[in-house]
Amino acid sequence: MDNSKFSGFYKKSPEERLKIIKELAKLTDEEAEILKKTGSLGMETADRMIENVVGTSEFPFGLGLHFLINGKDYVIPMCIEEPSVVAAASFSAKLARESGGFKTSSDDPVMIGQIQIMGFKNFQKAKKSILNNKEKIISKANERDSVLVSFGGGAKDLEVMKVDSKVGEMLIVHLLVDVRDAMGANAVNTMCEGISPLLEELTRGYVRLRIISNLADRRLARAKTIWKKEVLEKSTKGMMKGEEVVKAILEAYHLAVNDPYRCATHNKGIMNGVDAVVIATGNDFRAVEAGAHSFASITGKYKPLTKYHKNREGDLVGEIELPIAIGTVGGATRTKPEAKVALKILGVKTAKELSEVIAAVGLAQNFAALRALATEGIQRGHMRLHAKNIAITAGAKGDEIEKVSNKMTDEKNISVSRAKEILKEIRK
Ligand code: MEV
């Protein structure tokens, strides 16, 4: 590609940029049009959100149903490209209703800001100097965000740690900031930068990094529910006894406990649900992903984010605990139009409430995957939806979609070419 064409690219309008890339990548008119056709976001907003914009990209916006959380009904917006996820979460939630739904809890929305200090002479002296001036440092941090403080948030505490490394001894300050209903990265980063000169003065060292930690382990959300064995038996249409289903799910779970290869997939399934809600509400799914996986390995061993056991009645108890750093104010939660709608559908009042809803979805998602994997296998349901997508790709419309996908599923031959053939037959 001719790289000179990109000079000053960022200063151009999206239309001008699109023209350039159309030429360079030899896009057809149709292909260029795909990028140009923006959804609710609109080109102007998109262009203000990130750099070098030439279009927008969309996700299906589905609704997770049947969620009963702490006695309240929720409809849960989920944005994801993968078939089965929304159906699976809704299915689990429906089964969980039989025992009263999900019970959740969460920590205060406290994020950690890290300040890395190097070049000090004596760690203990530097640490003492910081701790002796704790109040002063905290109030200096809070000067940077009076709005957050007025809402009851702000820097609340700090901790000092030592990290030994190949390039020298480091003193790490953890600034603990209650970010209320925000995700918090902006507030925390601003505060970390704001207190750095004072920390340099106090330690006689120099500050290197000043940044939030995505291992948000002070901001954990939890959910718990019981899936009754009778309900589980019914869910297999009587193919398996309730006790057998509980046993099968526990066996599946214990592979994740003991094997990182399975555990990665186990946790991936949880994140299917978590990310779908995080994306629907305009939140930073990379931050939540980073938090979840680092928390999963915080003991030095990569662990499942969920836990299961059989209770005295022989029912299956499922629990989840993970960091969920999301907001209901700020960032894309307000700039992405559908994120605002998603929050309205959810009816959550605070980021804390949203984090608990997300935890419940993560648990529901994981249970659905384990149940399917441990009983009938995952492919049947998956394939039905996959066949529908293939039918649509082949050009099926309306009733044709069901007809084409059913035929392909029956034949166990799911491909665009077969879908086209079936379409031809139907349309004859
Ligand atoms: C697929 O996106 C997610 C699953 O693989 C999760 C799991 O195996 O637990 C089905």
Image (spheres, rainbow, N blue to C red):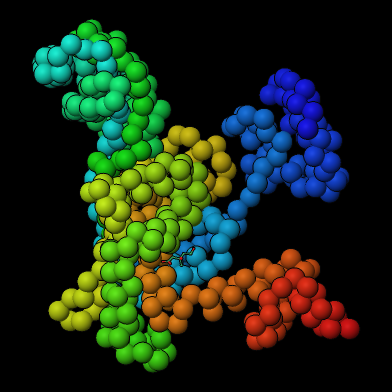
Question: Image height check: is 215 above or below 203?
Answer: below
Ligand 1 shows up in the quarter that is bottom left
Query: What residue is drawn where x is 33% and y is 45%?
Result: 294
- Asked if residue 35 lies left or right of residue 375, the reply is right
Check the image and name the residue furthest to the bottom.
238
Question: Image height check: is 138 above or below 19?
Answer: above
Question: Image height check: is 386 above or below 238?
Answer: above
Q: Quadrant of the C terminus?
A: bottom right
Query: What residue is drawn where x is 62% and y is 71%?
Result: 386
Q: How many marks?
A: 0
Instruction: Give x and y (percent) for residue 174.
Output: 24, 28
The answer to whether residue 317 shows anywhere in this view is: yes
- Asked if residue 347 lies left or right of residue 54, the reply is left
Quadrant of res 55: top right
Check the image and name the residue furthest to the front.
166
Between 251 and 46, the one nearer to me in the picture = 251
Query: What residue is drawn where x is 58% and y is 58%?
Result: 81
Between 71 and 366, the one nearer to me in the picture = 366
Instruction: Give x and y (percent) for residue 417.
Output: 78, 73
Quadrant of res 407: bottom right
Query: What residue is drawn where x is 84% and y is 41%?
Result: 26
Q: Quadrant of the N terminus?
A: top right
- Asked if residue 388 lies left or right of residue 312, the reply is right
Between 62 and 214, the one nearer to me in the picture = 214
Instruction: Give x and y (percent) for residue 303.
Output: 29, 56
Question: Image height check: is 192 above or below 404?
Answer: above
The answer to whether residue 396 shows anywhere in this view is: no
Instruction: Give x and y (percent) for residue 240.
Output: 36, 89
